[in-house]
Amino acid sequence: MAAGFGTATNRPLYNRGPAAGLRFTVYAILAVTLMYFDQRQQWSAQLRYLLQAAVYPLQVAVSSPVTAWRWLTSSTADRTTLRAENQQLLARQRELELVLMRMQGLEQENQELRGLHAALPPLVKKWQLAEVINVETTPLRQRLIVNKGSRDGIFENQAVVDAHGILGQTVHVGPWTAEIILITDPEHALPVQIVRNQLRSIAVGSGNPDEVLLPYVATNSDVKSGDVLVSSGLGGVFPAGYPVATVIGVSRETNQLLAQVRAAPLAQVERVREVMLIEFDPAHPAAPVLPSAAVVPPVAPAAPTAPVTKPPAEAPQ
């Protein structure tokens, strides 16, 4: 009777629920369905957008003590220090005014030499300042979070600079915040060129906030320490001529085809507190070259190939 009781009690437990194979099939179909609709309707992007909106109050609350301390420190600054800074700023303003007058004179002379009848439209269409509310500087991620989002007109792949040079670009934009990938991030690559000889290359993040790498420079290339790197205008994000970094080291091995070039970013990656998000006028001649436009030139040489073969055919006649 005890054995019969045990058999009666074990039988429902063994047969309870669907079989393991059926559950695996159901879960597999559900996973494939979710991946399909996520690919078509961008569910993960929408979820990230909602999560950024939900996390924004927490980010503000975390950064509030630091902001309050900075305000208290700046409000209690010594009057003598403020006067000295004021004098320095006035002197710097006079220097910049002289430089501006010189640049305006050169620009006017250049327009006259080229026979331009009207000044070119401004390259920068719109810009706005944003405050850094969170910083992540690890060997795998070099990111910033700023207090501007899609409600302020910020969009993905927007150029971000500070007072010294290129800082990075936006990668994820929420309603009130935006994530910026720095030029020192290992996943970031920026087309650059050397001011001294116009040699083009690509600056790749190293994971170190004080260093970027140029991994695609030939050993016999004319690169040396002290060379200034600026944006080349390719890539569709930054226009040409914006300062990026300064070469601090070049290592060449005789048995290697590529040199090891290291450069220090000009932007204050670790000390920046405010950044500038820039929107360029696409109709300006100096606007960044979009990647789609860069693919067009290789197709163009196909047309001249037919006329080139005609002169040899006509020569015997």
Image (cartoon, rainbow, N blue to C red):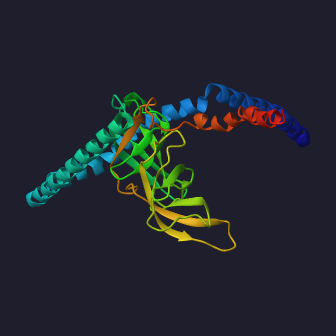
Image location (x, y in percent) of residue 22: 83, 32
Residue 12 in view here? no
Q: Quadrant of the N terminus?
A: top right
Which residue is pictured at 36% across the width and 48% down the height? 162
Depth order, front residue of 294/166: 294
Q: Locate residue 291: give its quadrant.
A: top right
> How many numbered callouts?
0
Depth order, front residue of 283/106: 106
For this view, does 71 lie left or right of residue 278?
A: left
Residue 86 in view here? yes
Q: Locate residue 313: give its quadrant.
A: top right
Say above or below: 72 vs 10: below
Image location (x, y in percent) of residue 186: 56, 54
Q: Quadrant of the C terminus?
A: top right
Depth order, front residue of 80/24: 80
Q: Residue furthest bottom?
A: 254
For this view, does 11 lie left or right of residue 144?
A: right
Say above or below: 243 vs 130: below
For this view, does 32 lie left or right of residue 175?
A: right
Say above or below: 60 vs 83: above
Depth order, front residue of 219/270: 219
Image location (x, y in percent) of residue 258: 64, 64
For this view, does 214 lie left or right of residue 85?
A: right
Image location (x, y in percent) of residue 164: 35, 53
